[in-house]
Amino acid sequence: MREDTGSTDEKYMKEAIREAFKAYDAGEVPVGAVVVCSGNIVARAHNLTETLGDVTAHAEMQAITAAANYLGGKYLDQCTLYVSLEPCVMCAGALFWSQAGRLVYAAGDEKRGYSLVGRKLLHPKTRVTKGVMSAESSRLLKEFFSERRK
C-alpha cells in the first residue's frame, strides 16, 4: 500500500525538523533540510553559517550539495527538498539551478523568503507545497530568537 502524500510529507518534514534541532543546539538559526529521492533520504543538512563563518552555508545549500555529490550529478529533478523554513532568494536560486522536482517547506519567512520576490525564482517545473508542520517549525524559530534576545 502506498503512503499518501500528506503523511509522506509529514514523515520527511519531521526529519528536516530534527536537523533544525541540531542547528539550534549548535547555536545556529534552527533550519534543517533533507533531500529525498525514490523514497530515500539522500542528504541531511542544517544551517552552518556560524560554525563555518560562511553566509552561504544555509541548510538548503548544504543539502543540495550533499545530494548532488551522493547522486553523482548536479540535477535534482527527481528529488524533493524538505526544509523547515521557506528558502531565501539565494537558496531558491540554487533550487532553480538544481532543477529540484519538488520543494516542501514548513514555516513561511515573511522577511526573507523567496516568495517575497516571486515564484519565478524557482525552476518552472518545481512543484511547491508549503505549510507542512509549520507550527512546529515556527515554535522552534520563535524560541531560538527569544533566547537570543535575553
Image: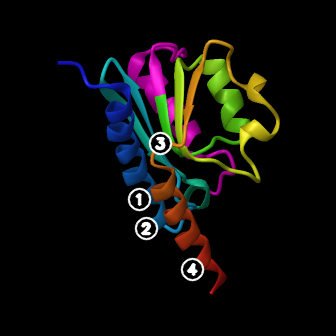
Q: Evaluate if marks 1 and 2 touch, with contact meaning CB atoms under 8 Å apart.
A: yes
Secondary structure state at the residue bearing disc 3: loop
Give whichever of discs 4 and 3 has the lower sequence position: 3
Name the front one of labels 1 and 4. Answer: 4
In the picture of the structure, the residue carrying the numbered disc 2 is: 25
In the picture of the structure, the residue carrying the numbered disc 4 is: 147
Q: Nearer the viewer, residue 76 or 2?
A: 2
Q: Residues within 10 Å of mark 3 (few under 14, many from 20)?
A: many
Q: Position of residue 29 (x, y in %)?
A: 57, 61
Give whichever of discs 2 and 4 has the lower sequence position: 2
Within the magenta stretch, is there residue 54? Answer: yes
Q: Which residues are magenta?
A: 53-80
Secondary structure state at the residue bearing disc 2: helix
Q: Residues within 10 Å of mark 2 (few under 14, many from 20)?
A: few
Distance (Cα) linking label 4 and label 3: 25 Å
Determine the residue positioned at 32% across, 35% down.
7
Q: Evaluate if marks 2 and 4 touch, with contact meaning CB atoms under 8 Å apart.
A: no
In the picture of the structure, the residue carrying the numbered disc 3 is: 132
In the picture of the structure, the residue carrying the numbered disc 1 is: 22
Give whichever of discs 1 and 4 has the lower sequence position: 1
Within the magenta stretch, is there residue 21? Answer: no
Q: Residue furthest right?
A: 117
Distance (Cα) linking label 1 and label 3: 19 Å
Determine the residue positioned at 73% across, 38% down.
114
Name the front one of labels 1 and 3. Answer: 3
Q: Which numbered tag is attached to residue 31?
A: none
